[in-house]
Image: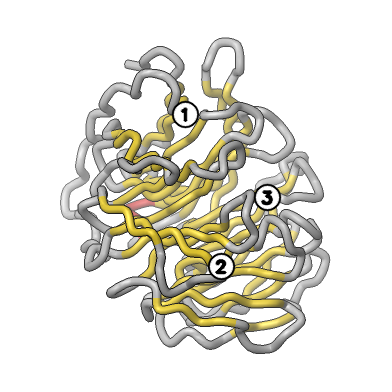
Amino acid sequence: MQGPGTALFRTEDMHNYSVEFSPFRDGLLAIGASQYFGIVGNGRQYIVQKDPATGGMQLLRFFETNDAIYDCSWSELNQNQLVSACGDGSVKLWDMQTKDGFPIQNYHEHMQEVSSVDWNLVSKRSFLTSSHDGTIKLWDPMSPRSLCTYQEHTQTLYNAIWSPTHPTSFISCSGDGTVKIWDTNQPTSAATIPAHRGEVLAVDWNKYDPFKFVTGGATTDPKVKVWDLRQPQIPIEMAGHRFGIRRIKCSPHDEFTIASCSYDMSVCIWRTNREDALSMPYEHHSEFVFGIDWNLFRPGEIVSSSWDEHVCVFNVNAPPPPRIPPPPRKPGMAPPPLR
């Protein structure tokens, strides 16, 4: 049952890893999902439209892949295109206007699963991928081969995220416990920051201050940390999650607001300008929450995606969404262990 201001979409028999609002159209969502928790089976890239008047969710299109989809990102150049990060090491570029179900480009250079993909917000002409093979790759969507490969992290990479203010700067986080700052004009990283005790699962830039970024740690250190590159030795640490933080997103409307989601099945909203920074924990999901994003067109509106086969759109300034019941568990299949 949906609550006031809440919209739900079910991805039946598919477990959701990522979700992103379109930068062009209000309420248009890309959802990256996988069978069997992403361990085995196919992936599916959903395109869903939320009706701004009724709150209904309409499936517009979906694309099938032979392996899991772990992340997705809308093109910043073409409102009909988006890219998916896949478990077989491939990256697929889709166009909503095609008549068939095939990608318009298939890039395959990573040797292991692709953990993240992020389109450049400033130049709009390139995107980044990060992989469990320990590499970050820079791509031009018009080229079949990557433009550059960056390899310094010593363990699995989880995120590589473009700066929202500088066209050649990006940040990465890894299982080696560090965050690295990069410039595409340089072959090596500009800075390395030991960020968490254990793996760093999530990172994002502040949208208002080019020197600030945020990180989320694994279950060994499940804190949200706010960093300033001018004083990287003294981050602000915020505790609230009980298990690893899978995704973290700074608000595009407020420089002090952060959203995070976790293996503890919650979404947390943080206000860093308050003494009690944890504004609200949302516990509407009944499985691990892997994806969150803010709607550029509606301040306070956020979307979360979970292994409970649901995507939930709600507003952090409204009453919390109702609890989503867990889906039926298939025999012989169980979620993998926490990170």
Relative vertical location of residue 49 with respect to residue 243 in this rendering, above or below: above
Q: Earlier in the sequence, mark 1 or mark 3?
A: 3
Cα gap from disc 1 to disc 3, whole angstroms: 20 Å
Q: Residue at x 27, y 59 (%)?
A: 222
Q: Are the residues at dot 1 and dot 3 in contact (C-beta closer than 8 Å)?
A: no
Three-letter code for the amino acid on which mark 1 is drawn:
Val
Q: State the residue position of label 1.
A: 313
Percent position (x, y) of residue 279? 35, 35
Q: Earlier in the sequence, mark 2 or mark 1?
A: 2
Mark 2 Cα-neighbour bin, 10 Å: few <14, some 14–19, many ≥20: many
Mark 1 Cα-neighbour bin, 10 Å: few <14, some 14–19, many ≥20: many
Q: State the residue position of label 2.
A: 160
**Residue 47 or residue 214, whichever sits in front:** 214
Q: Nearer the viewer, mark 1 or mark 3?
A: 1
Left or right: where 254 falls relative to 274: right
Three-letter code for the amino acid on which mark 3 is drawn:
Leu
Left or right: where 334 falls relative to 139: left
Q: Are the residues at dot 2 and dot 1 in contact (C-beta closer than 8 Å)?
A: no
Cα gap from disc 2 to disc 3, whole angstroms: 17 Å
Left or right: where 299 falls relative to 287: right
Q: Residue at x 64, y 35 (%)?
A: 296
**Picture disc at residue 148:** none
Q: Nearer the viewer, mark 2 or mark 3?
A: 2
Q: Secondary structure at mark 2?
A: strand
Q: Residue at x 29, y 36 (%)?
A: 281
Left or right: where 247 falls relative to 55: left
**Picture disc at residue 82:** 3
Q: Earlier in the sequence, mark 2 or mark 3?
A: 3
- Quarter of the N terminus within the rendering: top left
Three-letter code for the amino acid on which mark 2 is drawn:
Ala
**Residue 309 or residue 232, whichever sits in front:** 232
